[in-house]
Image: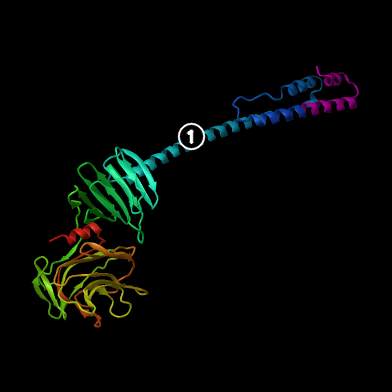
Protein backbone atom coordinates (compact mmCIF):
# COMPACT_ATOMS: atom_id res chain seq x y z
CA UNK A 1 0.00 0.00 0.00
CA UNK A 2 1.20 3.55 -0.70
CA UNK A 3 3.03 5.15 2.28
CA UNK A 4 0.90 8.34 2.28
CA UNK A 5 -2.26 6.29 2.03
CA UNK A 6 -1.08 4.23 5.05
CA UNK A 7 -0.49 7.44 7.04
CA UNK A 8 -3.86 8.83 6.06
CA UNK A 9 -5.72 5.73 7.22
CA UNK A 10 -4.06 5.72 10.63
CA UNK A 11 -3.95 9.47 11.32
CA UNK A 12 -6.32 10.70 14.09
CA UNK A 13 -5.55 14.43 13.86
CA UNK A 14 -8.12 15.94 11.48
CA UNK A 15 -5.83 18.76 10.31
CA UNK A 16 -2.97 16.40 9.34
CA UNK A 17 -5.48 13.97 7.86
CA UNK A 18 -6.84 16.73 5.61
CA UNK A 19 -3.31 17.64 4.44
CA UNK A 20 -2.52 13.95 3.70
CA UNK A 21 -5.75 13.68 1.70
CA UNK A 22 -4.83 16.71 -0.43
CA UNK A 23 -1.39 15.22 -1.10
CA UNK A 24 -2.95 11.96 -2.20
CA UNK A 25 -5.41 13.71 -4.51
CA UNK A 26 -2.72 15.96 -6.04
CA UNK A 27 -0.42 12.98 -6.60
CA UNK A 28 -3.08 10.93 -8.36
CA UNK A 29 -4.39 13.93 -10.31
CA UNK A 30 -0.89 14.44 -11.76
CA UNK A 31 -0.87 10.78 -12.76
CA UNK A 32 -4.28 11.22 -14.40
CA UNK A 33 -3.11 14.31 -16.32
CA UNK A 34 -0.06 12.52 -17.73
CA UNK A 35 -2.18 9.55 -18.72
CA UNK A 36 -4.70 11.85 -20.47
CA UNK A 37 -1.87 13.42 -22.49
CA UNK A 38 -0.80 9.98 -23.60
CA UNK A 39 -4.42 9.19 -24.41
CA UNK A 40 -4.75 12.30 -26.62
CA UNK A 41 -1.84 11.09 -28.75
CA UNK A 42 -3.58 7.76 -29.27
CA UNK A 43 -7.17 9.00 -29.68
CA UNK A 44 -7.52 7.44 -33.20
CA UNK A 45 -6.97 3.92 -31.80
CA UNK A 46 -10.06 1.74 -31.73
CA UNK A 47 -9.48 0.08 -28.29
CA UNK A 48 -9.68 2.50 -25.27
CA UNK A 49 -6.99 2.35 -22.57
CA UNK A 50 -7.87 2.44 -18.83
CA UNK A 51 -5.80 5.42 -17.79
CA UNK A 52 -7.11 5.89 -14.21
CA UNK A 53 -7.00 2.41 -12.66
CA UNK A 54 -4.44 3.34 -9.99
CA UNK A 55 -6.30 6.51 -9.07
CA UNK A 56 -9.61 4.65 -8.75
CA UNK A 57 -8.04 1.98 -6.49
CA UNK A 58 -6.65 4.65 -4.18
CA UNK A 59 -9.96 6.48 -3.90
CA UNK A 60 -11.88 3.27 -3.31
CA UNK A 61 -9.52 2.46 -0.39
CA UNK A 62 -10.08 5.94 1.04
CA UNK A 63 -13.82 5.64 0.52
CA UNK A 64 -13.95 2.53 2.72
CA UNK A 65 -12.88 4.70 5.71
CA UNK A 66 -14.24 8.12 4.73
CA UNK A 67 -17.04 7.95 2.13
CA UNK A 68 -18.34 11.45 2.66
CA UNK A 69 -14.94 13.14 2.32
CA UNK A 70 -14.16 11.51 -1.04
CA UNK A 71 -17.61 11.60 -2.66
CA UNK A 72 -16.98 14.82 -4.61
CA UNK A 73 -13.67 13.52 -5.90
CA UNK A 74 -15.33 10.30 -7.13
CA UNK A 75 -18.00 12.29 -9.01
CA UNK A 76 -15.28 14.32 -10.71
CA UNK A 77 -13.37 11.21 -11.78
CA UNK A 78 -16.52 9.47 -13.06
CA UNK A 79 -17.42 12.56 -15.11
CA UNK A 80 -13.95 12.52 -16.65
CA UNK A 81 -14.35 8.85 -17.53
CA UNK A 82 -17.71 9.53 -19.24
CA UNK A 83 -16.21 12.43 -21.20
CA UNK A 84 -13.36 10.17 -22.21
CA UNK A 85 -15.80 7.59 -23.61
CA UNK A 86 -17.60 10.27 -25.63
CA UNK A 87 -14.24 11.44 -27.04
CA UNK A 88 -13.44 7.88 -28.15
CA UNK A 89 -16.81 7.56 -29.92
CA UNK A 90 -16.43 10.91 -31.71
CA UNK A 91 -12.84 10.05 -32.71
CA UNK A 92 -14.00 6.74 -34.18
CA UNK A 93 -16.74 8.46 -36.21
CA UNK A 94 -14.24 11.08 -37.45
CA UNK A 95 -11.85 8.35 -38.57
CA UNK A 96 -14.65 6.60 -40.51
CA UNK A 97 -15.69 9.89 -42.18
CA UNK A 98 -12.07 10.65 -43.13
CA UNK A 99 -11.70 7.20 -44.68
CA UNK A 100 -14.94 7.68 -46.64
CA UNK A 101 -13.74 11.03 -47.99
CA UNK A 102 -10.48 9.45 -49.14
CA UNK A 103 -12.39 6.70 -50.96
CA UNK A 104 -14.75 9.25 -52.57
CA UNK A 105 -11.79 11.31 -53.76
CA UNK A 106 -10.13 8.25 -55.29
CA UNK A 107 -13.38 7.39 -57.08
CA UNK A 108 -13.72 10.98 -58.32
CA UNK A 109 -10.16 10.91 -59.69
CA UNK A 110 -10.89 7.63 -61.44
CA UNK A 111 -14.05 9.14 -62.96
CA UNK A 112 -12.09 12.21 -64.10
CA UNK A 113 -9.45 10.03 -65.76
CA UNK A 114 -12.23 8.11 -67.51
CA UNK A 115 -13.81 11.35 -68.78
CA UNK A 116 -10.44 12.72 -69.82
CA UNK A 117 -9.61 9.59 -71.78
CA UNK A 118 -13.04 9.78 -73.41
CA UNK A 119 -12.48 13.42 -74.35
CA UNK A 120 -9.11 12.59 -75.85
CA UNK A 121 -10.74 9.78 -77.78
CA UNK A 122 -13.36 12.21 -79.13
CA UNK A 123 -10.54 14.59 -80.09
CA UNK A 124 -9.31 11.93 -82.50
CA UNK A 125 -12.71 11.76 -84.21
CA UNK A 126 -12.38 10.91 -87.88
CA UNK A 127 -9.34 8.70 -87.46
CA UNK A 128 -9.83 5.11 -88.50
CA UNK A 129 -7.31 3.40 -86.22
CA UNK A 130 -7.61 3.62 -82.41
CA UNK A 131 -4.06 2.23 -81.97
CA UNK A 132 -1.96 5.29 -81.19
CA UNK A 133 1.78 4.82 -81.31
CA UNK A 134 2.65 8.15 -79.69
CA UNK A 135 1.61 11.79 -79.35
CA UNK A 136 4.30 14.41 -79.83
CA UNK A 137 4.24 18.18 -79.41
CA UNK A 138 6.72 20.09 -81.54
CA UNK A 139 7.77 23.75 -81.82
CA UNK A 140 5.80 26.13 -84.07
CA UNK A 141 2.50 25.10 -82.41
CA UNK A 142 2.35 21.58 -83.89
CA UNK A 143 0.72 18.56 -82.22
CA UNK A 144 0.99 15.17 -83.95
CA UNK A 145 -0.85 11.94 -83.14
CA UNK A 146 1.14 9.08 -84.69
CA UNK A 147 -0.60 5.76 -85.33
CA UNK A 148 0.80 2.27 -84.97
CA UNK A 149 3.37 1.02 -87.49
CA UNK A 150 4.09 4.53 -88.78
CA UNK A 151 7.57 5.73 -89.66
CA UNK A 152 8.45 9.42 -89.79
CA UNK A 153 11.29 11.86 -89.32
CA UNK A 154 11.30 15.40 -87.95
CA UNK A 155 13.43 17.36 -90.39
CA UNK A 156 15.86 20.14 -89.57
CA UNK A 157 15.76 21.89 -92.91
CA UNK A 158 14.72 25.53 -92.89
CA UNK A 159 11.45 25.03 -94.78
CA UNK A 160 10.68 21.32 -94.47
CA UNK A 161 9.22 20.27 -91.14
CA UNK A 162 8.43 16.56 -91.11
CA UNK A 163 8.50 13.55 -93.41
CA UNK A 164 5.98 10.71 -93.10
CA UNK A 165 7.60 7.68 -94.72
CA UNK A 166 4.79 5.17 -94.13
CA UNK A 167 1.68 4.88 -91.98
CA UNK A 168 -0.75 7.48 -90.72
CA UNK A 169 -0.77 10.53 -88.46
CA UNK A 170 -3.07 13.37 -87.45
CA UNK A 171 -1.52 16.84 -87.50
CA UNK A 172 -2.82 19.99 -85.76
CA UNK A 173 -1.06 23.24 -86.67
CA UNK A 174 -1.82 26.59 -85.05
CA UNK A 175 -2.52 29.53 -87.37
CA UNK A 176 0.66 30.80 -89.03
CA UNK A 177 -0.61 33.93 -90.74
CA UNK A 178 2.35 36.16 -91.53
CA UNK A 179 4.80 33.29 -90.98
CA UNK A 180 6.52 30.86 -93.33
CA UNK A 181 4.23 27.90 -94.15
CA UNK A 182 5.28 24.49 -92.83
CA UNK A 183 5.99 21.64 -95.26
CA UNK A 184 5.08 18.02 -94.52
CA UNK A 185 6.61 15.51 -96.94
CA UNK A 186 5.21 12.15 -98.03
CA UNK A 187 6.58 9.80 -100.72
CA UNK A 188 4.15 11.03 -103.37
CA UNK A 189 3.64 14.69 -102.46
CA UNK A 190 4.14 17.56 -100.04
CA UNK A 191 1.55 19.34 -97.88
CA UNK A 192 1.99 23.09 -97.43
CA UNK A 193 0.35 24.34 -94.23
CA UNK A 194 -0.65 27.76 -92.93
CA UNK A 195 -2.71 26.48 -89.99
CA UNK A 196 -5.23 23.64 -89.95
CA UNK A 197 -6.09 20.13 -88.77
CA UNK A 198 -5.55 17.23 -91.15
CA UNK A 199 -4.72 13.54 -91.47
CA UNK A 200 -1.73 12.28 -93.45
CA UNK A 201 -1.55 8.69 -94.71
CA UNK A 202 0.81 6.97 -97.11
CA UNK A 203 1.97 3.55 -98.28
CA UNK A 204 4.08 2.21 -101.12
CA UNK A 205 1.48 3.12 -103.75
CA UNK A 206 -0.04 6.46 -102.76
CA UNK A 207 -0.14 9.38 -100.32
CA UNK A 208 -3.27 11.19 -99.13
CA UNK A 209 -4.30 14.13 -96.97
CA UNK A 210 -7.76 14.47 -95.38
CA UNK A 211 -8.50 18.04 -94.20
CA UNK A 212 -10.60 18.35 -91.04
CA UNK A 213 -10.37 22.14 -90.50
CA UNK A 214 -8.97 25.00 -92.58
CA UNK A 215 -7.18 24.33 -95.86
CA UNK A 216 -3.80 23.16 -97.19
CA UNK A 217 -1.91 23.14 -100.48
CA UNK A 218 -1.02 19.67 -101.81
CA UNK A 219 2.09 19.73 -104.03
CA UNK A 220 3.79 17.21 -106.30
CA UNK A 221 6.54 18.32 -108.67
CA UNK A 222 5.17 21.40 -110.47
CA UNK A 223 1.51 20.57 -109.82
CA UNK A 224 -0.50 21.76 -106.79
CA UNK A 225 -4.12 21.75 -105.61
CA UNK A 226 -5.89 23.39 -102.65
CA UNK A 227 -7.60 20.99 -100.23
CA UNK A 228 -10.25 22.41 -97.89
CA UNK A 229 -12.26 21.10 -94.94
CA UNK A 230 -14.31 18.08 -95.97
CA UNK A 231 -12.01 17.25 -98.88
CA UNK A 232 -9.33 14.62 -99.50
CA UNK A 233 -6.29 14.96 -101.75
CA UNK A 234 -4.58 11.91 -103.26
CA UNK A 235 -1.30 11.41 -105.12
CA UNK A 236 0.06 8.27 -106.74
CA UNK A 237 3.30 9.94 -107.72
CA UNK A 238 2.03 10.74 -111.22
CA UNK A 239 -0.90 13.09 -110.60
CA UNK A 240 -2.87 14.84 -107.86
CA UNK A 241 -6.62 14.33 -107.41
CA UNK A 242 -9.21 15.72 -105.02
CA UNK A 243 -12.50 14.29 -103.76
CA UNK A 244 -15.27 15.95 -101.77
CA UNK A 245 -17.24 14.42 -98.94
CA UNK A 246 -20.06 12.60 -100.66
CA UNK A 247 -22.84 13.56 -98.20
CA UNK A 248 -22.09 17.29 -98.39
CA UNK A 249 -25.54 18.83 -98.84
CA UNK A 250 -25.04 22.36 -100.11
CA UNK A 251 -28.58 23.04 -101.25
CA UNK A 252 -30.38 22.71 -97.91
CA UNK A 253 -32.11 25.90 -96.69
CA UNK A 254 -31.04 27.83 -99.79
CA UNK A 255 -33.13 30.45 -101.58
CA UNK A 256 -32.24 29.87 -105.24
CA UNK A 257 -32.76 32.48 -107.95
CA UNK A 258 -32.02 30.96 -111.36
CA UNK A 259 -33.22 34.01 -113.32
CA UNK A 260 -35.22 31.96 -115.82
CA UNK A 261 -37.82 34.75 -115.83
CA UNK A 262 -38.13 38.32 -114.61
CA UNK A 263 -41.70 38.25 -113.32
CA UNK A 264 -40.76 37.41 -109.73
CA UNK A 265 -38.43 40.39 -109.39
CA UNK A 266 -38.72 44.11 -109.00
CA UNK A 267 -36.56 45.71 -111.71
CA UNK A 268 -35.09 49.06 -112.64
CA UNK A 269 -34.18 49.98 -116.22
CA UNK A 270 -34.41 47.26 -118.81
CA UNK A 271 -32.73 44.00 -117.71
CA UNK A 272 -33.10 41.17 -120.24
CA UNK A 273 -32.94 37.38 -120.23
CA UNK A 274 -29.96 35.87 -122.04
CA UNK A 275 -27.88 32.70 -121.98
CA UNK A 276 -26.63 32.22 -118.46
CA UNK A 277 -24.18 29.99 -116.64
CA UNK A 278 -26.96 27.40 -116.32
CA UNK A 279 -30.02 27.97 -118.52
CA UNK A 280 -30.98 31.61 -118.60
CA UNK A 281 -29.27 34.55 -116.93
CA UNK A 282 -29.92 38.28 -116.70
CA UNK A 283 -28.07 40.78 -118.88
CA UNK A 284 -27.43 44.14 -117.21
CA UNK A 285 -26.61 47.04 -119.53
CA UNK A 286 -25.17 49.61 -117.11
CA UNK A 287 -28.58 51.18 -116.52
CA UNK A 288 -30.55 48.21 -115.13
CA UNK A 289 -30.81 46.32 -111.85
CA UNK A 290 -32.71 43.56 -110.01
CA UNK A 291 -34.17 44.16 -106.53
CA UNK A 292 -34.99 41.28 -104.17
CA UNK A 293 -36.99 42.04 -101.02
CA UNK A 294 -35.51 39.84 -98.28
CA UNK A 295 -38.32 39.59 -95.78
CA UNK A 296 -36.02 38.03 -93.18
CA UNK A 297 -32.43 39.18 -92.84
CA UNK A 298 -29.95 36.97 -91.00
CA UNK A 299 -26.72 37.68 -89.12
CA UNK A 300 -25.41 34.31 -90.34
CA UNK A 301 -25.67 34.05 -94.13
CA UNK A 302 -24.05 33.23 -97.46
CA UNK A 303 -24.41 34.89 -100.87
CA UNK A 304 -23.33 32.91 -103.94
CA UNK A 305 -23.49 34.29 -107.50
CA UNK A 306 -22.11 33.66 -110.99
CA UNK A 307 -21.06 36.63 -113.13
CA UNK A 308 -19.61 37.39 -116.54
CA UNK A 309 -18.32 40.97 -116.70
CA UNK A 310 -18.35 42.54 -120.15
CA UNK A 311 -16.73 45.84 -119.21
CA UNK A 312 -14.60 47.25 -116.41
CA UNK A 313 -13.01 50.68 -116.04
CA UNK A 314 -12.01 53.18 -113.36
CA UNK A 315 -15.60 53.48 -112.18
CA UNK A 316 -16.91 51.52 -109.18
CA UNK A 317 -19.45 49.19 -110.82
CA UNK A 318 -21.72 47.48 -108.28
CA UNK A 319 -22.31 43.75 -108.74
CA UNK A 320 -24.38 42.96 -105.62
CA UNK A 321 -25.07 44.91 -102.44
CA UNK A 322 -27.34 45.27 -99.43
CA UNK A 323 -26.86 48.42 -97.37
CA UNK A 324 -28.58 51.57 -96.13
CA UNK A 325 -29.22 54.50 -98.40
CA UNK A 326 -26.87 57.33 -97.45
CA UNK A 327 -26.38 57.62 -93.67
CA UNK A 328 -24.33 54.83 -92.12
CA UNK A 329 -24.46 52.40 -95.08
CA UNK A 330 -24.70 49.35 -92.79
CA UNK A 331 -24.13 46.29 -94.97
CA UNK A 332 -21.94 44.97 -97.78
CA UNK A 333 -21.06 45.87 -101.38
CA UNK A 334 -19.23 43.71 -103.96
CA UNK A 335 -18.06 45.80 -106.89
CA UNK A 336 -15.78 45.76 -109.93
CA UNK A 337 -13.12 48.36 -110.71
CA UNK A 338 -10.28 47.98 -113.20
CA UNK A 339 -11.01 44.26 -113.63
CA UNK A 340 -10.66 43.71 -109.87
CA UNK A 341 -13.57 42.31 -107.89
CA UNK A 342 -13.58 43.90 -104.42
CA UNK A 343 -15.56 43.79 -101.16
CA UNK A 344 -16.63 46.66 -98.93
CA UNK A 345 -18.23 46.29 -95.47
CA UNK A 346 -19.67 49.08 -93.35
CA UNK A 347 -21.39 49.55 -90.00
CA UNK A 348 -22.41 52.66 -88.08
CA UNK A 349 -18.90 53.42 -86.82
CA UNK A 350 -16.39 51.88 -89.23
CA UNK A 351 -15.76 50.47 -92.69
CA UNK A 352 -13.55 47.97 -94.49
CA UNK A 353 -12.90 49.10 -98.04
CA UNK A 354 -11.46 47.55 -101.18
CA UNK A 355 -10.86 44.17 -99.59
CA UNK A 356 -9.14 41.64 -101.88
CA UNK A 357 -7.47 42.73 -105.06
CA UNK A 358 -8.01 39.80 -107.39
CA UNK A 359 -8.17 40.37 -111.12
CA UNK A 360 -10.77 38.61 -113.26
CA UNK A 361 -10.96 38.02 -116.99
CA UNK A 362 -13.71 39.83 -118.90
CA UNK A 363 -16.28 37.78 -120.84
CA UNK A 364 -15.57 34.71 -118.73
CA UNK A 365 -17.73 33.13 -116.02
CA UNK A 366 -16.57 33.57 -112.42
CA UNK A 367 -18.08 32.50 -109.12
CA UNK A 368 -18.17 34.93 -106.20
CA UNK A 369 -19.37 34.24 -102.64
CA UNK A 370 -19.57 36.10 -99.34
CA UNK A 371 -20.22 34.44 -95.95
CA UNK A 372 -20.58 35.77 -92.41
CA UNK A 373 -21.68 34.36 -89.05
CA UNK A 374 -23.27 35.67 -85.85
CA UNK A 375 -19.84 36.47 -84.36
CA UNK A 376 -19.01 38.80 -87.24
CA UNK A 377 -16.54 36.43 -88.90
CA UNK A 378 -16.69 36.83 -92.69
CA UNK A 379 -15.04 35.26 -95.75
CA UNK A 380 -14.95 36.42 -99.35
CA UNK A 381 -14.41 33.91 -102.18
CA UNK A 382 -13.54 34.07 -105.85
CA UNK A 383 -13.83 30.86 -107.90
CA UNK A 384 -13.89 28.70 -104.77
CA UNK A 385 -10.83 30.28 -103.15
CA UNK A 386 -11.02 32.42 -100.03
CA UNK A 387 -9.32 35.70 -100.93
CA UNK A 388 -10.25 37.80 -97.87
CA UNK A 389 -11.47 37.14 -94.34
CA UNK A 390 -11.77 38.86 -90.98
CA UNK A 391 -14.18 40.04 -88.30
CA UNK A 392 -16.62 42.88 -88.96
CA UNK A 393 -20.15 42.68 -87.46
CA UNK A 394 -22.95 44.78 -88.93
CA UNK A 395 -26.74 44.90 -88.89
CA UNK A 396 -28.88 45.66 -91.93
CA UNK A 397 -31.27 48.62 -91.86
CA UNK A 398 -32.90 47.56 -95.12
CA UNK A 399 -34.37 44.38 -96.59
CA UNK A 400 -33.52 45.26 -100.21
CA UNK A 401 -30.81 43.20 -101.90
CA UNK A 402 -29.74 44.82 -105.16
CA UNK A 403 -27.97 43.23 -108.14
CA UNK A 404 -26.25 45.41 -110.74
CA UNK A 405 -26.82 48.80 -109.16
CA UNK A 406 -26.80 50.60 -105.80
CA UNK A 407 -29.43 53.04 -104.59
CA UNK A 408 -26.58 55.54 -104.22
CA UNK A 409 -26.16 57.25 -107.59
CA UNK A 410 -22.43 58.03 -107.30
CA UNK A 411 -21.68 54.29 -107.75
CA UNK A 412 -21.93 53.05 -111.33
CA UNK A 413 -24.03 50.07 -112.51
CA UNK A 414 -22.60 46.71 -113.53
CA UNK A 415 -22.30 45.76 -117.22
CA UNK A 416 -22.48 42.02 -117.94
CA UNK A 417 -24.48 38.87 -117.09
CA UNK A 418 -25.40 37.40 -113.68
CA UNK A 419 -26.89 33.99 -112.89
CA UNK A 420 -27.64 31.42 -110.20
CA UNK A 421 -27.95 33.59 -107.09
CA UNK A 422 -28.23 31.51 -103.91
CA UNK A 423 -28.82 32.91 -100.44
CA UNK A 424 -28.32 30.70 -97.37
CA UNK A 425 -29.36 31.57 -93.79
CA UNK A 426 -26.04 30.15 -92.55
CA UNK A 427 -22.33 30.56 -93.16
CA UNK A 428 -21.21 27.86 -95.61
CA UNK A 429 -17.90 26.08 -95.15
CA UNK A 430 -15.00 26.43 -97.56
CA UNK A 431 -15.69 22.94 -98.88
CA UNK A 432 -19.31 23.86 -99.61
CA UNK A 433 -18.30 27.05 -101.40
CA UNK A 434 -15.74 25.14 -103.42
CA UNK A 435 -18.33 22.52 -104.37
CA UNK A 436 -20.70 25.22 -105.67
CA UNK A 437 -17.88 26.82 -107.67
CA UNK A 438 -17.25 23.49 -109.43
CA UNK A 439 -20.86 22.89 -110.42
CA UNK A 440 -22.05 23.24 -113.96
Q: What segment carries the magenta color?
A: 1-29
Name the main secondary structure of what is drawn in magenta: helix
Please determine whether, in this image, residue 145 is positioned above or below residue 43: below
Residue 219: x and y in percent read 24, 54
Q: Is residue 393 visible?
A: yes
Residue 196 belongs to the span the image colors magenta: no
Residue 77 shows in this picture:
no
15 versus 366 height, above or below: above
Residue 342: quadrant of the picture: bottom left
The secondary structure type at the circle numbered 1 is: helix
Q: Is residue 243 left or right of residue 79?
A: left
Task: Specify the quadrant that holds the C terminus.
Answer: bottom left
Viewer-proximal residue, 217 or 39? 217
Relative to the observer, which residue lies in front, 240 or 40? 240
At label 1, counting other C-alpha atoms closer than 10 Å, the crowd grade (few under 14, some 14-19, many 20 or more) is few
* Residue located 39% across and 39% down the image: 114
- Asked whether, in this view, residue 418 is left or right of residue 65, the answer is left
Residue at 32% over, 80% down: 327
The x, y position of residue 82, in whole percent, is 66, 29
> Which quarter of the rendering shows the N terminus?
top right
Residue at image location 27% in from the left, 52% down from the top = 191
- Residue 71 pos. (x, y %): 77, 27
Q: Is residue 18 magenta?
A: yes
Name the residue beneath numbered marker 1. 103
Q: Position of residue 297 (x, y in %)?
A: 26, 68
Amino acid sequence: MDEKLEQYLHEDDSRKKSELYKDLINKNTETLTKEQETDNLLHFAFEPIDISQKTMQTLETIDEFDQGFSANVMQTINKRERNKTVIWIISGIAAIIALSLVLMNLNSMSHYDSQNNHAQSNGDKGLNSPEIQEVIVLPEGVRITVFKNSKFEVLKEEKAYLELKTGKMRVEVESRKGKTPLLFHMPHGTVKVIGTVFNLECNAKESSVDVIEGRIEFIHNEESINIMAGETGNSNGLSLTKSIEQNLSVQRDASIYSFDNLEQFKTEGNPKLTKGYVGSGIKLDGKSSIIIDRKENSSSETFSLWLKAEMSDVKTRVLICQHDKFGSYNGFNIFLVKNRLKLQLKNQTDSLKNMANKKIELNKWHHVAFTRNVDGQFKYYLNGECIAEGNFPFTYKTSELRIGKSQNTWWSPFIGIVDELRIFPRSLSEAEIYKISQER
